[in-house]
Amino acid sequence: MNLVQVIKILGDENRLRILNLLNHGELCVCEIERLLETNQSNTSRHLNKLTIANLISYEKRALYVYYKVNNNAFDEFQFLRELVSNELTKLEKCKADLIKLEKYKSSGLSCEDLKEGKVCLKDA
């Protein structure tokens, strides 16, 4: 991956929001969908682009796929750490996403609970 490709990948607000969330730990696809309030198709498309760019990695566990930041890419492109750790947190949507993430994490609920509609993250 070269610098131009990385910058092109970062040119989408939803991909930046995903990186913002993943900077705080790994998340399942369904968690990302609910936190961003996006549909499965769009979420998967953005995750695929971030994965191809090697900015995130994933691991399949049972029925779920978990994504996390690829620290090797962040080591190679040091500006990514600054962007994700400091700049994204200034954006209103990213701030709201982190509030929803904290609410979700503190709820003790799981991916299965999300699928069953046991938690509403819109009110965060």
Image: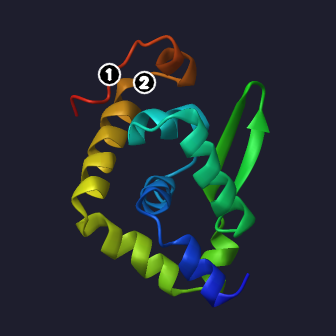
**Residue 32 sits above or below residue 79 on the image:** above
Of circles 1 and 2, the one toward us is: 1
Which quarter shows the N terminus? bottom right
Q: Earlier in the sequence, mark 1 or mark 2?
A: 2
What label sits on residue 95 in the rendered view? none
**Label 1 neighbour load within 10 Å: few <14, some 14-19, many 20+:** few
**Label 2 neighbour load within 10 Å: few <14, some 14-19, many 20+:** few
**Residue 17 sits above or below residue 27 on the image:** below
The amino acid type of the residue labelled 2 equals Gly
Q: Residue at x 48, y 72 (%)?
A: 11
Answer whether residue 27 is visible to the viewer in this image: no
Specify whether 57 is left or right of 121: right
Q: Quadrant of residue 68?
A: bottom right
Count the labels in the image.
2
Q: Residue at x 31, y 39 (%)?
A: 100
Answer whether residue 29 is visible to the viewer in this image: yes
The x, y position of residue 116, in whole percent, is: 50, 11
Residue indicated by mark 1: 120
The x, y position of residue 97, in whole percent, is: 32, 47
Q: Residue at x 51, y 72 (%)?
A: 10
Specify whether 42 is left or right of 122: right
The x, y position of residue 85, in whole percent, is: 39, 71
- Mark pair 1, 2: CA separation: 13 Å
Check disc 2 and report its element: helix, strand or loop: loop
42 or 107: nearer the viewer: 42
Residue indicated by mark 2: 108
Q: Quadrant of residue 77?
A: bottom right
Q: How is the image coloured?
A: rainbow
The amino acid type of the residue labelled 1 equals Cys
Check disc 1 and report its element: helix, strand or loop: loop
Q: Residue at x 66, y 86 (%)?
A: 76
